Image (spheres, grey):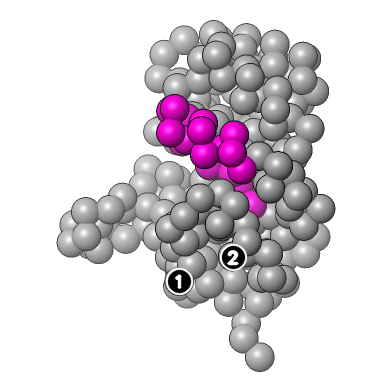
């Protein structure tokens, strides 16, 4: 199944290695148009790696559509990261806070105005996005995460239909609670099989979706399984 005009994207961690090493690995994978630069953590080690590879990352700006996933806890000090990335990335993904969403919206609005950046709030734990939405201005969109919805017992198709006009990116991945009990990994961010009922219901709606579809799993084997759903091997 083709999902054009969507941008098919993957995380910047699909093989063990740095940002540049992952980009080098992905550069000849023609089915992939985008890469989500991951900053779940932005400590001194990650910052040093990012600084050292910045020029090489820029080199891939013509090959990939970049987005960026910002740290879970956003602080005013992260404004330097926003300033550097804003000219490169299509948008930033943020997690709604547990408390005081108005403080985060105020910070995002400041960064938006200063750096001409766009921010998408992701559905994480139930209720957090809903608390933030009334505070968000119209140009702040939504990142729909299918794994989080499934863990909360929600239907991804219902969510997509309700918020379609504001969804700029979809984190597309499955849930496997049984395997999580065995391997100790998260129950979500699991490989798509292609025959999940919820996925088969959602896929036709993506045929004319023009945002980013991000296969947000963290190994090449799992990413490749997702690519094969949209681009079956010949």
- The local crowd at label 2, few if under 14, some if 14 to 19, many if 20 or more residues have their Cα within 10 Å, is few
User: Measured from the top left, where is residue 204 in percent x and y?
Assistant: 67, 66
* Magenta run includes residue 150: no
Quadrant where the C terminus is found in the figure: bottom right
Distance of label 1 from label 2 (alpha carbons)? 13 Å
Where is mark 1, residue-wise? Answer: 221
**Image x and y of residue 19, in percent:** 56, 49
- Residue drawn at x 75%, y 38% is 88
Circle 1 sits in a helix, a strand or a loop, which is it? Answer: helix
Q: Where's the N terminus, which quadrant?
A: bottom right
In this rendering, which labeled residue sits more in front, label 1 or label 2? 2
Residue range (magenta): 35-53
Report whether 125 appears left or right of 55. Answer: left
Residue lying at the far front of the rendered structure: 52
Name which residue lies at 66% across and 25% down: 82
Q: What is the residue that sits farthest to the bottom in this orientation?
A: 234
Q: Which of 107 and 1 is in front in this view?
A: 107
Q: In this view, does 152 lie to the left or right of 178?
A: right
Of 86 and 159, nearer the camera is 86
Using the image, tell me which numbered label, if any, was put on residue 199: none
User: To which residue does mark 2 refer?
Assistant: 25
How many marks are shown on the rendered structure? 2
From this view, report whether residue 85 is shown above or below residue 150: above
Horizontal arrangement in the rendering, residue 217 relative to residue 228 (left or right): left
């Amino acid at each position: 199944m083709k999902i054009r005009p969507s941008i098919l994207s993957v995380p910047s961690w699909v093989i063990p290695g740095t940002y540049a090493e992952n980009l080098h690995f992905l550069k000849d994978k023609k089915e992939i148009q985008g890469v989500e630069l991951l900053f779940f953590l932005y400590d001194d080690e990650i910052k040093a790696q990012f600084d050292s590879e910045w020029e090489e990352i820029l080199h891939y700006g013509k090959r990939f559509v970049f987005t960026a996933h910002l740290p879970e806890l956003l602080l005013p000090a992260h404004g330097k990261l926003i300033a550097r990335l804003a000219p490169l990335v299509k948008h930033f993904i943020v997690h709604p806070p547990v408390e005081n969403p108005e403080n985060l919206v105020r910070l995002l609005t400041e960064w938006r105005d200063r750096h001409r950046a766009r921010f998408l709030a992701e559905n994480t734990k139930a209720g957090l996005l809903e608390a933030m939405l009334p505070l968000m201005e119209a140009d702040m969109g939504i990142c729909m995460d299918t794994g989080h919805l499934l863990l909360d017992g929600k239907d991804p198709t219902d969510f997509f239909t309700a918020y379609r006009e504001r969804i700029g990116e979809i984190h597309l991945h499955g849930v496997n609670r049984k395997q999580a009990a065995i391997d100790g990994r998260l129950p979500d961010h699991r490989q798509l099989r292609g025959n999940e009922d919820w996925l088969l219901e959602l896929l036709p709606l993506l045929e004319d979706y023009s945002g980013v579809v991000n296969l947000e799993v963290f190994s090449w084997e799992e990413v490749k399984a997702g690519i094969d759903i949209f681009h079956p091997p010949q």
